[in-house]
Amino acid sequence: MKDLHTLQQQFRTLFGGEGTAFFAPGRINLIGEHTDYNGGFVFPGAVDCGITAVIRPNNSSSVSIYAADLERSCRFNIMDEKGPSDMNFRYVYGVVREMMVAGVPVEGFDAVYGGDVPLGAGMSSSAALECCFSFALNDLFDGSLDKMALARIGQATEHKYVGVKCGIMDQFASLHGRAGALMRLDCRSGEFQYFPWNPEGYRLVLVNTCVKHELVGSPYNERRASCERVAALAGVETLRDCTWEQLSTLNSKLSTQDHNRARYVLGEVDRVMAVSDALERGDYEEVGRQMYLTHEGLSHDYEVSCPELDFLVDEARRLGVSGARMMGGGFGGCTINLVKDDRCDTFLDEVQHTYRERFGIDCRPISVVIGDGAHRL
Ligand code: GLA
């Protein structure tokens, strides 16, 4: 967690007096990638790093925020229709506006925030920011929104103020996380279960490619549009409800690209269930096997991987890692690896060496600690 003491000190210097501190984490996802906006299952967990904010209502309609990591500040009025143009502050502005739409009596406030989610790692620092503020404002202004409603506030912020048509996974995980447990969420019904995560003899470790490929257009939204086209042709609301038989009868009506993308999603929905069963049996080798299959699908059918991610997954396989795949939206960020304890050090040493040789830059291992969801500090 970001050093709370420093943030409190900065709050005192800028605004005088004390504020209330809140924290919301980033997330990992064991399996179930690009399934959330298709009504499928995801398997995330909150991590122990995230966004910390010190906040205090100021009895006005004006919001003053200082982003400590960026050393930048911003001021806006909650009644302002357009909001700040600086993307970093649009997350907070969006949350404020969406909370007002949801009936929370939000007023002006002063805030200082900072974070320790590794940047560009695909661990959802933006969801952590949205959830830190939605959780805090609901608490400070006596809102009555439950965690799922708060998650939707964050998702609506991405859609309407940032332009990413994301699913619900990241915000869900940031709010509902529980130390030592992963969660399986059914994104169609909103039902979820906690799965204690205590894989004896294994470790989860992320390897950050430290690249984020800026692609033309909006590849994330394009993937979603492909899925929606196929679902519409199949006459179902989301691909979760499309069967393999239905997909095969649509073959002639679909572009190869849309067909491959839908094939990935149907397969991924099945894989999450296979992983749930394997976890119940304690069969971590099977969990890992499914992770590799997910990566193949994301790389070849869904086409959201990149050479750096593919390389890290190939290296993991070569070095005897039980399971590895890219994690999150794609085009950079990190891989998630399920590694036997006794192979972990060799894997990390070797992969850092070969990655540097191949790409001329360093990749960065991040050990995973499953932490709690958003809370007051
Ligand atoms: C991003 C989105 C999520 C999800 C993942 C892919 O993290 O914010 O909603 O779609 O990509 O699984």
Image (spheres, rainbow, N blue to C red):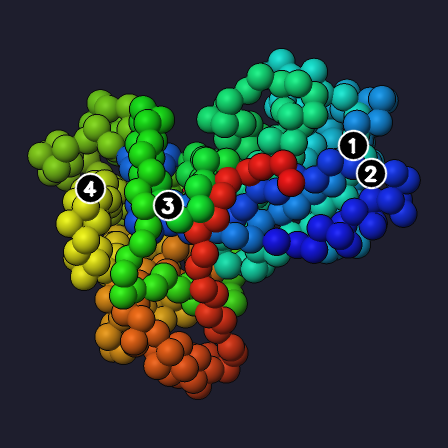
State yes or no: discs 1 and 2 in contact (Cβ < 8 Å): yes
Figure check: 156 above or below 18: above
| Residue 227 found in image quarter | top left
Q: Nearer the viewer, mark 1 or mark 4?
A: 1
- Judge left or right: residue 302 versus residue 376: left
Kind of residue indicated by mark 1: Arg
Give the CA distance from mark 3 to mark 1. 32 Å
- Judge left or right: residue 84 versus residue 133: right
Q: Position of residue 284 (x, y in %)?
A: 21, 58
Q: Secondary structure at mark 4?
A: helix
Q: Can the viewer see residue 164 in this picture?
A: no
Kind of residue indicated by mark 2: Glu
Q: Which residue is mark 4?
A: 273
Q: Which residue is mark 3?
A: 181
Q: How many marks?
A: 4
Q: Position of residue 66 (x, y in %)?
A: 79, 45
Q: Nearer the viewer, mark 1 or mark 2?
A: 2
Q: Can the viewer see residue 207 in this picture?
A: yes
Give the CA distance from mark 4 to mark 2. 47 Å
Q: Nearer the viewer, mark 3 or mark 1?
A: 3
Q: Which residue is mark 2?
A: 18
Mark nearer the N terminus (1 vs 2): 2
Kind of residue indicated by mark 4: Met
State yes or no: discs 3 and 1 in contact (Cβ < 8 Å): no
| Residue 248 found in image quarter | top left
Q: Which residue is mark 1?
A: 56
Mark 2 lies within 8 Å of ligand 1 (Cβ measured): no
Residue at 45 percent across and 64 percent down: it is: 367
Density class for disc 4 (Cα within 10 Å; few <14, some 14-19, many ≥20) is: some
Mark nearer the N terminus (3 vs 1): 1
Mark nearer the N terminus (1 vs 4): 1
